[in-house]
Image: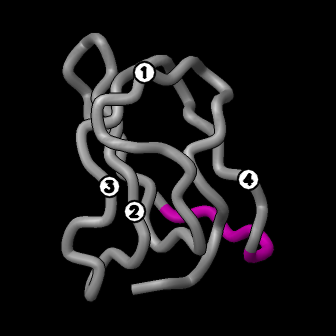
Amino acid sequence: MDFKVPVGENVLATRSGTVTRTNWNTRSNGNCVEVRFADGTLAKYLHLSKTSVRAGQRLSRGDVVGESGNTG
């Protein structure tokens, strides 16, 4: 699901989870972050202008994962 916001706005984790990877397939996804939640659900934050996390990092709901953008 895409959300339209101005470039550079903070993008927040919707739930607590663990970052599984960042910046894969940047040609299509741009700067991106993948987060796995406790129930196994994966959230993918794509087309970011900047990422603020690294693989293996634990996140709480509301933590900044990056900034909105239009990459990829």
Q: Is residue 35 left or right of residue 65?
A: left
Report, in whole angstroms, how far the alpha carbon at label 4 lies from the one at label 2. Answer: 13 Å
Relative to the observer, which residue lies in front, 25 or 14? 25
Q: Residue at x 68, y 70 (%)?
A: 4
Q: Which residues are magenta?
A: 2-7
Q: Secondary structure at mark 3?
A: strand
Relative to the observer, which residue lies in front, 57 or 47? 57
Q: Quadrant of residue 46?
A: bottom left
Q: Amino acid at mark 4?
A: Asn
- Front of the two marks 1 and 2: 1
> Label 3: how many residues lie within 10 Å, few (<14), some (14-19) or many (20+)?
many
Circle 3 sits on which residue?
A: 22
Earlier along the polypeptide chain: callout 1 or callout 2?
Answer: 2
Q: Position of residue 5 (x, y in %)?
A: 75, 68
Q: Amino acid at mark 1?
A: Arg
Q: Amino acid at mark 2?
A: Cys
> Label 4: how many residues lie within 10 Å, few (<14), some (14-19) or many (20+)?
many
- Front of the two marks 3 and 4: 3
Q: Is residue 60 left or right of residue 46?
A: right
* Prevailing secondary structure of the magenta residues: loop
Q: Which mark is residue 10?
A: 4
Q: Quadrant of the N terminus?
A: bottom left
Q: Which mark is residue 58?
A: 1
Earlier along the polypeptide chain: callout 3 or callout 4?
Answer: 4
Q: Secondary structure at mark 1?
A: strand
Circle 2 sits on which residue?
A: 32
Report, in whole angstroms, how far the alpha carbon at label 1 lies from the one at label 2. Answer: 16 Å
Number of dots carrying numbers:
4
Q: Quadrant of the C terminus?
A: bottom left
Earlier along the polypeptide chain: callout 4 or callout 2?
Answer: 4
